[in-house]
Image (cartoon, rainbow, N blue to C red):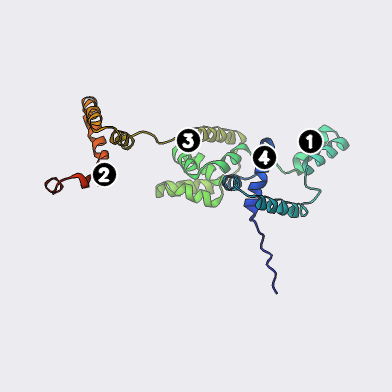
Amino acid sequence: MEVDTKPLIGGASAAAILMLLLEEKEAADVLRHLDPDEVRQLGSEMFGAAKADENRVDLALGRFVAGSREVSALTPGADRKIRNVMTDALGDDRAGSLLSAIAPQPQREALERLRWMETETIAEVIAGEHPQVGAVLLSMLAPEIAALALTGLAGERQADLLWRAARLGPVQAEAIDDLEAILAEAEAASAKTETLEIGGESDVAKIVNNLPRTAGEELLKAMRKKDKLLAAAIEDEMFVFEDLNQLDAKSLG
């Protein structure tokens, strides 16, 4: 008989449950090590995991324990340990010179910003800046994101940007610094504030419909003096299909 080896809980769901079991600071520390897409997926899963029952929590913990056995004991803190060993053996200057040549280089801030920005925002920056800046940006993007960012531009602009990108060579550090400033400004401008749709003609019409008829008519009369168009729009919203039952045959016709 074939044994079903399919996990009883998905990896994303298990991770979300574990994140909710952590202290807030510990959970935040975990998120800092994830890619933007991973943060979005995990955050979405966490809202669903908030109602997990005891059985699913047990499954999540079991999956974590099983997965932990596959993690090398050498991995945690390896970078810091290597640097400390080199420094102790060679001294600060010699170790720094050697590590700058052999250690993985951290990503520039511009690359990190691009990873977190929405494609629409990137496209706006490319469209609004000098074509040479746009060409540098395109070259720094993942190919599929670069293609999406180009989509909304005119064909002639697209061709010019790709031509410039194809001719790019080494880019000076100062130019990257300027680009980081541009991206920081665009990122701040595109930050969205959560809003709640309240009020409006429909909501006011519902309030008036729930008032005594005489009171409602008096209020609408007062509103017409302030704003005839708005009062008319509210009256339109007040009329619902149920009102047809109250019309006589002549009015209905």
Tags 2 and 3 touching, CB below 8 Å: no
Give the x, y percent position of residue 253.
Answer: 13, 49
**Left or right of 210 on screen, residue 166:** right
Discs 4/1, front: 4
Mark 1 residue element: helix
Identify residue type, mark 1.
Answer: Gly
Residue 251: image quadrant is top left
For the question of whether residue 33 can be seen, the reply is no
Whichever of labels 4 and 1 marks the residue nearer the N terminus, that label is 4
Whichever of labels 4 and 3 marks the residue nearer the N terminus, that label is 4
Identify residue type, mark 4.
Answer: Ala
- Residue 33 vs residue 13, the one in the foreground: 13
Distance of mark 4 from mark 2, alpha carbons?
A: 50 Å
**Left or right of 50 on screen, residue 200:** left
Identify residue type, mark 2.
Answer: Val
Q: Is residue 71 above or below residue 179?
A: below
Point 78% across, 37% down: residue: 97
Give the x, y percent position of residue 247.
Answer: 17, 45
Q: Which residue is mark 1?
A: 96
Q: Which residue is mark 4?
A: 27
- Residue 27 vs residue 123, the one in the foreground: 27
Distance of mark 4 from mark 1, alpha carbons?
A: 33 Å
Discs 1/2, front: 2
Q: Which residue is mark 2?
A: 240
Tags 3 and 1 touching, CB below 8 Å: no
Tags 4 and 2 touching, CB below 8 Å: no
Whichever of labels 1 and 2 marks the residue nearer the N terminus, that label is 1
Q: Which residue is mark 3?
A: 194
